[in-house]
Amino acid sequence: MTHTYTIKGMTCGNCEVKIKSSLLMLPNVTEVEVSKEKQTATISMDKHISLSTFQNALDKKYSIEAIEHNETTEQAKSWFATYKPILLIFCYITIVAFMAAKQQHNFNWMQGMNIFMAGFFLTFSFFKMLDLKGFAESYAMYDIVAKQIKAWGLIYTFIELALGIAYATGFQPLLTNIITLTVMSVSIIGVLQSVFNKRKIQCACLGAVFNLPMSTVTIIENALMIAMSAGMLFKML
């Protein structure tokens, strides 16, 4: 995509060179054309980059503003494009879980949550299985256990698969939910640390197949599993 921006503060040809060089250093920027006469910069990028990112890359005497597009709309489009795979998966699993829970005269929440958890773990373990080594390497970048135990990424994938089968078949629901609550609670620690420290790393939730950035979406995903397993445990006890 290509957008044109107004840049205020340019006074000479050296400003053009300095701004172009600074913007080209940003990831996903492929081409930059700067004009001192028009006070503009036309930037081509692989995906939308926020205005604040451009501003931070420039010297403080320059200010950049969007003139051809709505920045909020473009950021929303970029967010949905980035997280489209995981959003679609959640939508599909939610629809199936809702259909399974809806009975003739009532709504069985426990059944719905069981099906959702089964779909979640089976789907996510499937994507991890496509590149086990790649997942293990990505996971070790932020998970507190995988950092210490190299094989944990591989073990974690098979734990997810086993949990998916357990939820789908109704095997030992009490034990299944205890393991889920424990594993996901440990897993979310590394996620929280990475997000709060603003580390720009790949989220390994869908393995190494999709290049999803670590963000609050990952926190929500983990927190949802923790909340569901805790809710089902509370219902059983």
Image: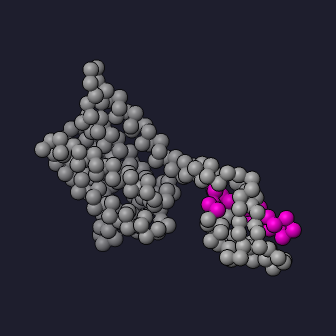
Residue in view at x 65 percent, y 54 percent: 71
Give the x, y percent position of residue 57: 65, 72
The part of the image, by quadrant, that contains residue 186 is bottom left
Looking at the picture, tell me which residue is in the foreground, 135 or 11.
Answer: 11
Which corner quadrant holds the C terminus?
top left
Q: Quadrant of the N terminus?
A: bottom right
Residue drawn at (47%, 45%), measured in percent from left and top? 87
Q: How many marks?
A: 0
Percent x, y of residue 70: 67, 51
Compared to residue 102, the image places residue 35 above or below, namely: below
Queried whether the magenta region covers residue 49, the answer comes back as yes
Q: Confirm whether residue 83 shows in the render.
A: yes
Residue reaching furthest to the left = 237
Q: Is residue 28 left or right of residue 68?
A: left
Task: Give coordinates of residue 143: x percent, y percent.
Answer: 35, 65
Specify start and end residues of the magenta stretch as a single range.
Answer: 31-51
182 to the left or right of 87 = left
Query: Do we see residue 168 in this rendering?
Result: no
Hey, which residue is sitting farthest right in the picture?
Answer: 37
Q: Residue furthest bottom?
A: 14
* Residue in view at x 38 percent, y 67 percent: 193
Quadrant in the picture for residue 153: bottom left
185 vs 115: above or below: below
The residue shown at (28%, 20%) is 104
